[in-house]
Amino acid sequence: MQRNTAVLVAIVLLTTVVMGSVTGTPPRPGTEENGLTENESATLWSRDADDYISEEEYQRRYGEPRTAIHELANGTDITFKRPPHTAATWTSHDFTDLAPGDADTSVHPPSVSLDDGLFIEDAHASVFAVHPSTRGHIEEGQTPLYIAPDGTFRGFIDYRVRVPSDGSTNNTTIEWSLQSHEIDEVRLVEDGTVIARTAGNHSPVLDYQLDNDRRTTLTLEADISVRLQNATTVEDGNQTNRTVTYRDETLTVSDSLDVEVYDLEAYPHYAEYPNGDTGVSMFQTRPWQGYTLSADGETRVRGVWRFYTARDTDWDTLVQSSTTGSTEIESDAIPVYVHAYPSRIGPRAEPVRDGPEILEVWGISRSTPASTLGENINIEVVEQSYTTSYGLAVRSPDVDRSAIHVAGIVRGVNATIVEPPAGSERQIRESNLTIDVIEET
């Protein structure tokens, strides 16, 4: 599953840091075993360049055909009605390709903050991904990362060890050697409380459980320890004295991620019409996907939100740091996230022709979030202000109140329905009206 690694090296003076310029390129769909089909893999890369090539040219280059979805994704971006599983599946498989350095080399993302100790250098703990999750594009300056209350957190930890140089003066010789080095423990911390921990390793996977619908910060922490041996030999005439001591160092590194725990509660109201239709209005204080009205799931309504998947470009490249400098390489592991955005398509009911009638959509008026999407995102995002569709009211003859299912914008997160108080249901009565002419001019 390893992708080709591109390394650009310049010939420079020994005191110069060597940096390559490597551009992250998503792998060609169907060329990696990542738990996805070729079609599913093709839909992942909404941040690719979309430089379309014809089917004839594709077969000439690669000697094989591609699927229709793969061809479509080559020229545009694929969007979804519901948050797909593909981002989490890809990320969990690709994460296994992430390889640390050895005692002399630290591997890290270019943007990470590095910590140094006396012997431990270029140390870091970096957040790789958390799933299930969805990056919401609400408006400029507001792009929260919504995470499921129960999920999986992945990180990457690495460092290198600086062993002092040996030396000798007069009749004294000093020798240094590395005895041991390891990551002792990895923790996931929320508001000062450890919510998950695991034995030390470079690529920790931590399952977490959170409650309450709130904003919070998750912090990945790791303890790194090294032991060095110092041997001092003194020649005193015909006598040799050798003294051995040990130097220990422990360094804690961390990285934090601001998130919003996404735990929905939906508030419905119902109305009965004289012809037997049922009116349903559903309200939620966060972005949400929509709700189904029938047991078979065919009768449904969704709000303004649609979805796409894209890689985290912070992991396009990695840096290998050593005592002689740094080299930039292409990353073998690329995390992918689901993104939610307000679509120009707007709220929709299904079935399209004879499905529910949307009576009202309400929420907060927001400006377009188009500027938050980044480069190479070709989707039908709203271009003007829009309504967040926190509330949706519909009328339909096909409503099974026991089967109503409210879905969120984070995969697998469905709302707890808070039923209205008994007796609050509205009865819409049919009326017969008569008109008498009182005065005519």
Image (tube, helix red, strand yellow):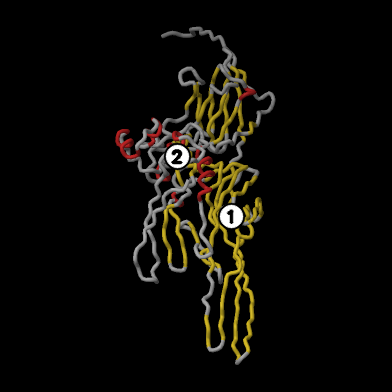
Label 1 vs label 2, nearer the camera: 2
Q: What kind of residue is marked 2?
A: Leu
Q: Is residue 288 above or below residue 112?
A: above
Extreme-bottom residue of the structure: 237
Q: Height in image: 16 above or below 86?
A: below
Q: Residue at x 46, y 18 (%)?
A: 353
* Residue in the foreground of this view, choosing between 263 and 129: 129
The residue positioned 64% from the left and 33% from the top of the image is 416
Disc 2 on helix, strand or loop? loop
- Tally the numbered discs: 2
Specify the farthest residue to the right: 422
- In the rendered structure, find residue 44 and report the number of the disc placed on it: 2
Residue at point 59% right, 36% down? 413
| 285 relative position to 318: left or right | right
Pinpoint residue 304: horizontal percent, then vertical percent: 47, 33
Q: Nearer the viewer, residue 344 or 270?
A: 344
Tell me residue 274's x, y (percent): 58, 13
- Residue identified by numbered label 1: 220
Judging depth in this view, the residue of 318 and 338 nearest the camera is 318
User: Which image quadrant: the C terminus?
Assistant: top left
Residue 42 numbered mark, or none = none
Q: Position of residue 298 (x, y in %)?
A: 54, 22
Q: CA distance from mark 1 to mark 2?
A: 27 Å
Give the SS element for disc 1.
strand
Image quadrant in which you'd find residue 181: bottom right
Q: Amino acid at mark 1?
A: Leu
Please rate how many residues cluster around mark 1, counting C-alpha atoms within 10 Å: few if below 14, some from 14 to 19, many from 20: many
Residue 374 position, x and y percent, is 40, 46
